């Protein structure tokens, strides 16, 4: 079920009313959330409910056995079972064809012919998100950061909680599970905050992202015919399309959760106002970047064992992050580009900025006017170049588009009609950039309701886009 669908427009109020009618019974509330989540997820394809159920059951049993086992060997055995099951499901459904095709291509390069073993595998929506969420849970139980949950209904509701099930945020058990174990009280203020976020998320998705998608597709689907200026605009628009699409989903997810008295973690903090790549990755897809930090980067040694190994760990994290997004060489290229751009900034902040010469140069540049604006623009351009590889179907397409864009001769700037979407978005975000959870730039009641009305009218005017699925459903 899509947030931007007619079905969800009926689904949410029904679940909301039933949920608060059961306010006196916590267990029934959690059971209702579980049933609602299964309906929400099964609306897409009910057959894949068996996958999430298997993941829930195995991790539930594994965590209890990890918690109660006296032997360290048994704890490791149950942790291994949990991780192997989750990565096995993810690997088969997401990466099977990629690795088989790569193996056949490698063998063919040696002069041997092999018949393809690929299968017509459908990627279950949200599998990358809920497998990471449940893996983090069992790892945290093993590390004694949290205690195992003994209530299967509560644990299943935590894993399958429908607002964030298919595209995050990837919640930690230490944050979300306790909220499901205590009775929630209805809060009018919290609900109003939730409705604001839902409205803002729908605006970003339906009005901005889906409108820009038309321009983006016209460039990426007809690369050879596109001019350098068209490609420049196409990459520029895609940068905002994917941001509004994904952050719009997160806003709706966080807002919907507020309606049920539950707070989710922030996933975006205005990333395109970042002044460097370190700051960008502290603001973009926060739930995933912190997941890789805590469960990949730090276990590899983090930055504790010298600069060289820290750089190695950064490269591993970005390559794995690229692979997480999809089984394609373009995603690996996207991760590699970010690693190459990230490492110099990391080295500067880790050891370079305290060097006398570097420090004096930095102080000089920081005194210059508009230095922050320049840094923001440079960071955005770097991120946009990486998005070119992320969006392209093949490396060859990405390289061709980059060359056309780089050696752009004077050509008419087309696709200008879509620029106002980006301008409107940036103007609003300039006002609200201090608090990502309060997308309300004015306090005056009349202006506030005028603002709400304008957003609703624009959403209705663009409702023909409402069937467009969210980009991160593919990952």
Image (cartoon, rainbow, N blue to C red):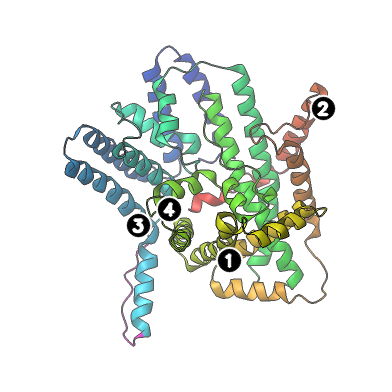
Residue named by callout 4: 304
Residue named by callout 1: 389
- Is disc 4 surrounded by few (<14), some (14 to 19) or many (20+) residues within 10 Å? few
Q: Nearer the viewer, residue 11 or 447?
A: 447
Q: Secondary structure at mark 4?
A: loop
Query: What is the CA distance from the residue labelled 2 to the residue labelled 4?
Result: 52 Å
Residue named by callout 3: 91
Q: State yes or no: residue 116 in magenta.
A: yes
Residue named by callout 2: 447
Which badge, 1 or 2, comes first in the chain's sequence?
A: 1
Q: State yes or no: residue 45 in magenta.
A: no
Question: Image quarter for residue 190?
Answer: top right
Which badge, 4 or 3, comes first in the chain's sequence?
A: 3
- Is disc 3 surrounded by few (<14), some (14 to 19) or many (20+) residues within 10 Å? some
Looking at the image, is mark 2 or mark 4 nearer the viewer?
4
Query: What is the CA distance from the residue labelled 1 to the residue labelled 2?
Result: 42 Å
- Is disc 1 surrounded by few (<14), some (14 to 19) or many (20+) residues within 10 Å? many
Residue 299 shows in this picture? yes
Query: What is the CA distance from the residue labelled 3 to the residue labelled 1?
Result: 23 Å
Question: On screen, 18 above or below 324?
Answer: above
């Amino acid at each position: 079920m899509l947030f931007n669908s007619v079905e969800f427009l009926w689904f949410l109020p029904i679940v909301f009313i039933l949920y608060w009618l059961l306010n006196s019974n916590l267990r029934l509330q959690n059971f209702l959330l579980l049933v609602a989540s299964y309906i929400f997820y099964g609306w897409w394809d009910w057959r894949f409910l068996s996958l999430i159920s298997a993941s829930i059951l195995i991790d539930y049993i594994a965590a209890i056995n990890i918690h109660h086992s006296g032997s360290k060997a048994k704890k490791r055995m149950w942790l291994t079972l949990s991780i192997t099951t989750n990565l096995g499901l993810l690997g088969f459904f997401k990466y099977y064809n990629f690795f088989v095709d790569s193996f056949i291509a490698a063998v063919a390069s040696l002069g041997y012919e092999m018949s393809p073993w690929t299968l017509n595998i459908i990627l279950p929506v949200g599998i990358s998100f809920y497998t990471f969420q449940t893996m983090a849970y069992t790892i945290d139980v093993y590390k004694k950061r949290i205690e195992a949950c003994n209530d299967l209904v509560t644990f299943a509701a935590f894993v399958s909680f429908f607002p964030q099930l298919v595209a995050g945020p990837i919640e930690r058990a230490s944050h979300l599970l306790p909220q499901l174990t205590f009775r929630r009280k209805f809060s009018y203020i919290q609900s109003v905050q939730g409705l604001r976020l839902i409205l803002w998320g729908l605006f970003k998705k339906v009005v901005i992202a889906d409108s820009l998608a038309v321009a983006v597709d016209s460039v990426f689907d007809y690369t050879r015919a596109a001019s350098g200026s068209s490609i420049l605009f196409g990459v520029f628009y895609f940068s905002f399309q994917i941001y509004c699409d994904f952050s719009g989903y997160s806003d709706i997810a966080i807002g919907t959760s507020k309606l049920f008295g539950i707070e989710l973690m922030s996933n975006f903090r205005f990333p395109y106002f970042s002044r460097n790549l370190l700051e960008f990755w502290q603001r973009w897809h926060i739930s995933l970047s912190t997941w890789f930090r805590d469960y990949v980067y730090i276990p590899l040694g983090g930055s504790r064992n010298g600069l060289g190994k820290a750089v190695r760990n950064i490269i591993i994290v970005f390559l794995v992050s690229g692979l997480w997004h999809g089984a394609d060489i373009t995603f690996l290229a996207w991760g590699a580009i970010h690693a190459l751009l990230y490492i110099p900034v990391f080295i500067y902040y880790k050891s370079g900025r305290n060097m006398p010469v570097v420090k004096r140069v930095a102080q000089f540049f920081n005194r210059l006017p508009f230095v922050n604006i320049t840094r923001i623009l440079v960071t955005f351009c770097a991120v946009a170049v990486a998005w070119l590889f992320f969006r392209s179907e093949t490396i060859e397409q990405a390289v061709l588009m980059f060359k056309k864009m780089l050696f752009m001769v004077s050509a008419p700037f087309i696709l200008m009609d879509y620029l106002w979407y980006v301008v409107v978005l940036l103007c609003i975000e300039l006002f609200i950039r201090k608090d990502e959870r309060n997308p309300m730039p004015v306090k005056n009641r009349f202006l506030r309701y005028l603002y709400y009305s304008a957003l609703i009218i624009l959403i209705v005017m663009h409702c023909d886009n409402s069937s467009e699925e969210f980009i991160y459903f593919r990952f």
